Image (cartoon, helix red, strand yellow):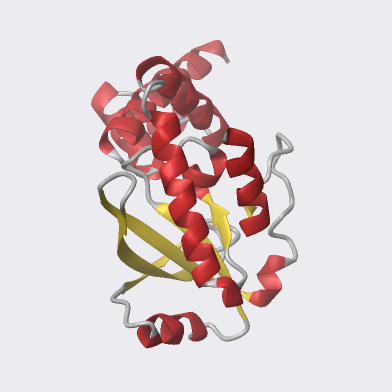
């Protein structure tokens, strides 16, 4: 139905602006864009369509700043992945996919034999963090996961960034590297991230 496709595209374009310029997460941006435009939520775009819109918006309005901001966040993510190496960290979200800006959070997934081990490690390192509950490895339809939220400095951006650690079972690592419908990976380990940094350099 072209009409529904047109509505989804309009919502995606409006949501992309909210994500890039206001730092909204994807779900909230879709809902707010539909509400602001007075369009039905039944026509919300899927994440692939929204990611395409985000990339287009960045290319048009932020091409001069976004690559440097993305690199700063990826370098910060790499340092935290080294620091948390015992929990097999994998980078996911906008920083991994290349759509992050200075307003984006860094999302690391930790694969732990003991779900409390990561919290204990952070306490032992003298780090302050908040605990929340969010989507697990199978998205919002699956079992929720613990999120450990840290407010960390990013010297390259001269501001602070939210580092979100999702604590998952070690068994979840087996299917973690399967590609999405477009053949792209949803996450990567430190080696994969380093390849991206070397390529960008």
Residue closest to the eye, 29 or 85: 85
State left or right for residue 111 relative to residue 17: right
State left or right for residue 50 relative to residue 11: right
Q: Image height check: is 129 above or below 52?
A: below
Residue closest to the eye, 71 or 173: 71
Which residue is rendered at x = 55% and y = 58% of the image?
A: 141
Q: Quadrant of residue 72?
A: top left
Q: Quadrant of residue 23?
A: top left
Q: Is residue 189 visible?
A: no
Residue 65 in the image: x percent, y percent? 36, 27
Which residue is rendered at x = 68% and y = 45% of the image?
A: 185
Residue closest to the eye, 46 or 176: 176
State left or right for residue 64 relative to residue 136: left
Q: Image height check: is 133 above or below 124?
A: above
Residue 134 in the image: x percent, y percent? 43, 63
Residue 156 in the image: x percent, y percent? 34, 46
Which residue is rendered at x = 70% and y = 74% of the image?
A: 171
Residue 127 in the image: x percent, y percent? 32, 77
The quadrant of the picture occupied by the C terminus is: top right
Which residue is rendered at x = 39% and y = 87% of the image?
A: 124
């Amino acid at each position: 139905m072209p009409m529904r496709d047109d509505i989804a595209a309009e919502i995606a374009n409006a949501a992309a602006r909210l994500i890039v310029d206001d730092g909204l997460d994807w779900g909230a941006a879709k809902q707010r864009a539909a509400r602001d435009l007075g369009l039905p939520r039944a026509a919300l775009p899927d994440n692939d369509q929204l990611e395409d819109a985000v990339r287009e918006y960045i290319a048009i309005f932020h091409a001069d700043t976004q690559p440097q901001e993305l690199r700063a966040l990826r370098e910060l993510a790499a340092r935290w992945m080294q620091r948390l190496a015992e929990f097999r960290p994998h980078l996911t979200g906008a920083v991994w996919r290349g759509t992050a800006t200075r307003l984006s959070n860094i999302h690391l997934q930790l694969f732990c034999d003991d779900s409390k081990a990561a919290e204990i490690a952070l306490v032992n390192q003298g780090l302050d963090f908040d605990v929340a509950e969010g989507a697990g490895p199978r998205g919002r339809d699956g079992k929720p996961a613990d999120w450990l939220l840290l407010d960390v400095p990013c010297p390259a951006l001269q501001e602070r960034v939210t580092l979100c650690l999702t604590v998952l079972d070690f068994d979840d690592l087996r299917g973690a590297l399967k590609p999405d419908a477009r053949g792209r990976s949803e996450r990567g380990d430190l080696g994969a991230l380093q390849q991206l940094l070397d390529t960008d350099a």
